[in-house]
Amino acid sequence: MTCRDVSRRASTYLDEDLSLRERLALKAHLFICVNCRRYVAQLAATLNLVRDRQWAGVDEEAEDRLAAMFRQSGKSDGGSGFTCT
């Protein structure tokens, strides 16, 4: 699995919707790639914040749009903005 693959599948991974094979491949890549570990950790923290809706005035529709934007950004061009080391 490449960094681009991780960036495309990170949201699905965090939602626990990957197949066993994909999940193991992603975890193996995270073990060796510090940049992808950071990316997935940052995405997880952001999604947790959105899910917890700790912000005043954020309605469920806005939360859904924001989550969809995160998912879409990972599908377009890899979306991560980093390279493997």
Image (cartoon, helix red, strand yellow):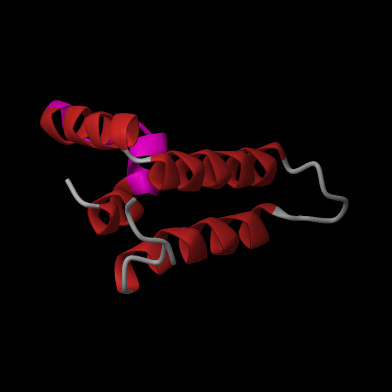
Numbered-mark total: 0
Q: Residue at x 33, y 35 (%)?
A: 30
Residue 72 x %, y %: 40, 66
First to last magenta residue range: 10-20
Quarter where residue 57 is shown: bottom right
Q: Residue at x 32, y 29 (%)?
A: 31
Q: Is residue 16 magenta?
A: yes
Task: Locate the N terminus by quadrant.
Answer: top left
In the picture as drawn, the residue positioned furthest to the right comes out as 56
Q: Decide if residue 80 is on the left or right side of residue 54.
A: left
Q: Decide if residue 76 is on the left or right side of residue 67.
A: left
Q: Nearer the viewer, residue 85 or 70?
A: 85
Q: Nearer the viewer, residue 85 or 75?
A: 85
Residue 83 x %, y %: 35, 60
In the picture as drawn, the residue positioned furthest to the left comes out as 21
Vertical placement of residue 64 versus 24, above or below: below
Q: Residue at x 34, y 50 (%)?
A: 85
Residue 19 x %, y %: 16, 32
Quarter where residue 20 is shown: top left
In the picture as drawn, the residue positioned furthest to the bottom comes out as 76
